[in-house]
Image (cartoon, coloured by chain):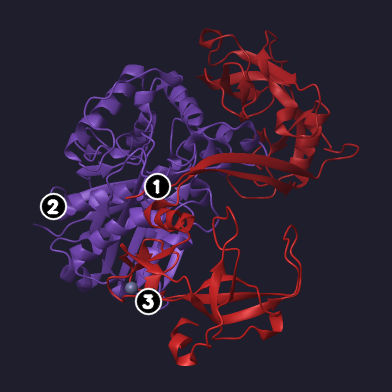
Amino acid sequence: MRDIALVAFAQTDHRRSSDELSEVEMLMPVLHDVLAQTGLQTSDIGFTCSGSSDYLAGRAFSFTLALDGVGAWPPISESHVEMDGAWALYEAWTKLLTGEADTALVYAYGKSSPGSVRDVLTRQLDPYYVAPLWPDSVALAALQAQALIDAGDTDEPALASVAARSRAEATANSHAQLRGSVPHGDYLVRPLRTGDCPPIGDGAAAVILAAGERARELCARPAWIRGIDHRIEAHGLGVRDLTDSPSARLAAEKAGAFERPVDTAELHAPFSSQEVVLRKALRLGDDVRVNPSGGALAANPIMAAGLIRIGEAAAAVHRGESDRALAHATSGPCLQQNLVAVLEGDPL
Amino acid sequence: MPEVLKAPLAVEFPFTRSLGPVQSAFLTGLRERVVLGVRTGDGQILVPPVEYDPVTAEEIRDLVEVAPAGTVTTWAWNHEPRRGQPLDTPFAWVLVRLDGADTALLHALDVPGPDAVRTGMRVRVRWAATRQGAITDIACFEPYEGRPAEPAQPAGHTGQFADPITGIVAAARLDYTYSPGRAQSAYIHALSDRRTVGERCPSCHKVYVPPRGACPTCGVATSEQVEVGPRGTVTTYCIVNIKARNLDIEVPYVYAHIALDGAGLALHGRIGGIPYDQVRMGLRVEPVWTEGARYPDHYRPTGEPDADYDVYKELL
Ligand SMILES: [Zn+2]
């Protein structure tokens, strides 16, 4: 297999609203940023893949407008996933593995501000038995949180401390939307308080992948993707044990995460309770630094937040702050789908 | 910078979905106040039932009837019900394992407050007054003191009902406040003064109309505004012979690509003020505005000589 690395990462400042910008206007600066980091032009990129959602935008084929930002002419090799950009990265990784391209640009964006993201996310649920009841994303996460509390895996003060630690870590992240001390707030859907829930915001991110020697040319310390895998749970919420995430564990195992300890983990856990599930499923000890970026509790641009976890993990490797990092992305209600990547730097 | 425009945008869709044999039996059963589950290969009973085993992916059709009462496996207190949710008074979301089932069903529980709900409490179905074969035929759950029958052994069920439902209409509405962003806002603002503005790419110098803030050829941001038109040249056209619904234009009419003077690509518009069979490539046209309109109604000939093909051939 070819060695493939993440060589550049950029993200927007995530904000509650960016209505002065269209999606492509919001996206363009991060595309230019990753290209500038590597010295590449859009015409040098072998494969382009993006993640976004029409339901968030409220328009069909909304991703085609964002394509203006990557110079889609002359015809480029391009694809799109109607999912978080982490899954676009997975597609790009497989494309590079085939040898058909040596570099890939992966980007993702989401503007939650035009609509009501709690309502929008109900449309991804089972349309026969669940979606007609309009259970919103916070309600479903709250069911999972109560299951964890009943199982003795956590309690409300422990959840509050997860949220407080995330926002404290985010003080060092200028892109984050919620930083420092954030009131834990009232119940949004009990047992989750506003502080247990992610901020609603707009944002975008982009990364560049490169294979083999090309990666070394483009980056002083490439973040080599040692393994990446994604798995899914049964869609029926009542079929699953909500206190566990066997799909995250299996993805981690297949990605090689358990072969050697990791020093850093970027977990896509939009709700404080989901970090509890993931720490257990991914067997993360207290010596692993979890979400030094602040994680999704500090900024959760839907469709980009998972790609940002991979980008943040890679950036820690680039900076020499991590030698072996785990990155996780999720999609769907209550951690339904999980992707795990393991990133390593060359020995310093 | 002019104010960025905003407008309400409602997206509504009545998705029409067909049901497979198991879903049809389950939803028809709800209409008849019967709750059905399905037995998996390893003997688990799934409620609500699915057509494929979540573990083995085998097709499963072995229907059983379970009780309309059960036990809460987890809950969440929803003090501010949202549009479309089962109750409009504060309620608990619950996962309920019905007696005889091994998995839980998501629904609402009608209780006065969070102190009246706990994991493990007994509940039963409250049926909707009118039922049509949908998950909302269960209006909600309500507290229930009865114990499960011992042993809770579900009986097989044929899943056969008179007049089974075979599909559902899943209506949905989402509300947005749409903003077209900086570049398109500037374009629309200019149109209100009956001017057309594009943006020039700093790299290839092409002028995009309407501008979207990026050059799709070069992948770079555009920001330099350029006023184009008002006159232009027909680069290509077609003759429309079929009347569109709700369109108050006599057929045949001509629909054309029009390269406004100074623009790097053509817009589209209708050509009027000339018989349809006299429209031609190279015809010089100008916009015709009607009172209160937000964009030109159509374009008409200016009377100038036709443009040379070489002048507009790059814009075809
Ligand atoms: Zn250009």
Q: CA distance from mark 1 to mark 2?
A: 39 Å
- Colour displayed for chain B in the image of the structure: red
Do the residues at pointers 3 and 2 share their chain? yes
Q: Which mark is residue A100?
A: 3
Q: Residue at x 46, y 19 (%)?
A: A190
Q: Residues within 10 Å of mark 1 (few under 14, many from 20)?
A: some
Q: Residues within 10 Å of mark 3 (few under 14, many from 20)?
A: few
Residue under label 1, please give it: B4
Q: Secondary structure at mark 3?
A: loop
Screen quadrant of the C terminus of chain A: bottom left
Screen quadrant of the N terminus of chain A: bottom left
Direction from residue A156 to residue B114 in the image, left or right:
right
Ligand number 1: quarter of image? bottom left
Q: Which mark is residue A319?
A: 2
Q: Which mark is residue A288?
A: none
Mark 3 or mark 2: name the one nearer the start of the chain: 3
Q: Secondary structure at mark 1?
A: loop
Q: Residue at x 75, y 46 (%)?
A: B19
Q: Please, is residue A241 above or below residue A258 in the view?
A: above
Q: Which amino acid, mark 1?
A: Val
Residue reaching furthest right? B162
Q: Which amino acid, mark 3?
A: Glu
